[in-house]
Amino acid sequence: MDAKRRRELARAFKAGGAHYDAVRPSYPDAALDFMVPPAARDAVDVGAGTGIFTAQLLGRGLKVGAVEPSEDMLAVLRERLPEVDAVPGTGEETGLDASSADVITYAQAWHWVDPKAASAEASRLLRPNGQLALVWNQLDVSVPWVHRLARIMHAGDVHRPDFVPPLGPEFHAPESGAWTWEQALTPEQVIALAKSRSYYLRAGAATRARVEHNLTWYLFDHLGHVPGVPFGLPYLTHAWRARLRA
């Protein structure tokens, strides 16, 4: 994604932090085990959004800083996690002190940055032997009905199986891990999830209405789900970790 396209898509998240926080899932414990070095003390969560992953890092006993360009998202994060030093900034320019972190994390956010510039900034922030860790939750499109759902939702963060996130030369080649799991959601919550995605947020009224109509038909008429009754929505969580070169 070029810089102009990233900026256009990212504008969708200038508002709607409370809705995003209400519908987006957290991440499996196994992914955090993989991403966070055992000896890590200080973490910086970049593109932290409303603090969903930030809270999970705090739960590991880490001292956590958060960086997020959307003031609306930051407001939600600061309210839910007042103990976190949450600052406005980007992956390319965090404004944080050099050599201040043992691990830099990006949850659902690396695709919003220039990977070369963000890698250089991460290497500046990390201490020797530090680690950059990236993670995405995505719908498990290996399941046929989920694949069709993802297409109706225009879920743009579904990666190809052979996807490897681009990193700068400051880091060794990344190692990857993957985990499948399910989130219990009602059909109405799935529709709300679709409304938190950049495609829907940037769309006009007619496109939004079409997405909602198609989802309503697919979930209730085609799949036969019952209003208000939760069902298991399959997810795939894919994470990468890369060590800082000496």
Image (cartoon, helix red, strand yellow):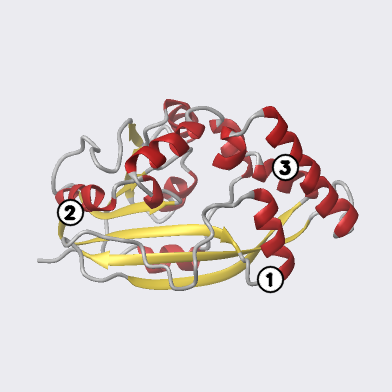
Question: Depth check: 227 or 206 in front?
Answer: 206
Question: Depth check: 185 or 42 in front?
Answer: 185
Contact, mark 3 vs mark 2 (Cβ under 8 Å): no
Expressed as whole percent of the image width and height from the top left, the position of residue 46 reads: 34, 45
Closer to the eye: label 3 or 1: 3
Amino acid type shown at disc 3? Val
Secondary structure category for the residue under label 2? helix
Q: CA distance from mark 3 to mark 2?
A: 41 Å
Q: Residue at the location (82% across, 46% down)?
A: 216
Secondary structure category for the residue under label 1? loop
Chain-order first, disc 3 or disc 1 = 1
Q: Which residue is mark 2?
A: 123
Q: CA distance from mark 3 to mark 1?
A: 21 Å
Q: Residue at the location (69% across, 36% down)?
A: 207
Secondary structure category for the residue under label 3? helix
Amino acid type shown at disc 1? Val
Q: Which residue is mark 3?
A: 211
Amino acid type shown at disc 2? Ser
Q: Which residue is mark 1?
A: 143
- Direction from residue 226 to residue 178 in the image, left or right: left
Chain-order first, disc 2 or disc 1 = 2
Contact, mark 2 vs mark 1 (Cβ under 8 Å): no
